[in-house]
Amino acid sequence: MKNEEHDYAAYVTLNIIGGKWSLLILCHLRKRTVRFCEFPKLIPGLTQKILTKHLRDLENHGLVHRTVFPEIPPKVEYSLTDHGKSLGPVLDCLEQWGKDHLNRARSLNRCVDNSADQI
């Protein structure tokens, strides 16, 4: 039973942060507060529709805080909540594993997914 719970917990975690866009959004928010209009510049290929969906999902999971400033034009900023900041060690591990994997693949002269170089 414990293994099933552990596997399910990992599944839930990956379901929340495992998508390409959500993970990139979290990585940028980990560094600083980001305005909505800055995300497309930080993450090429991210459309406004997809960005809105992922930010809402992350906000609903309590990972991201949305701040709306009452001014014209509207200004909206996003930052990590304390719960979102608790993902720091997880993101560190993912980043380190990715670096290790890329180095290993390069040292073995294997074809490496070039999409990582675009991030």
Image: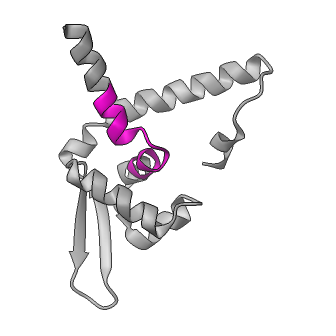
What main secondary structure does the magenta stretch of the protein show?
helix
The residue depicted at 29 percent of the width and 53 percent of the height is 57
The quadrant in which the N terminus is found is top left
Please, which colouring scheme is shown? one colour
Nearest to the observer: residue 30 or residue 40: 40
Q: Is residue 31 magenta?
A: no
- Picture coordinates of residue 108, whole percent (x, y): 76, 16
For the point 46% across and 69% down, the residue is 48
Q: Measuring 63% from the left and 41% from the top, which residue is drawn there?
A: 116
Provide the residue span drawn in magenta: 11-26
**In the image, 16: left or right of 101?**
left
Instruction: Find the residue positioned furthest to the bottom.
Output: 72
- 112 relative to 85, above or below: above
Q: How many numbered markers are drawn?
A: 0
In the image, is residue 94 above or below residue 39? Answer: above
Q: Position of residue 45 (x, y in %)?
A: 58, 60
In which quarter of the view is residue 71 placed?
Answer: bottom left
Is residue 12 within the magenta segment?
Answer: yes
Q: Residue 117: x, y in percent?
A: 67, 43
User: Position of 61 compared to 41: left or right?
Assistant: left
Report which quarter residue 43 is drawn in.
bottom right
**For this rendering, which residue is in front, 51 or 25?**
51
Q: Residue 84: x percent and y percent?
A: 26, 45
Q: Which residue is at the front of the view, 40 or 82?
A: 40
Say which residue appears at 59% left-offset and 22% top-offset.
Answer: 100
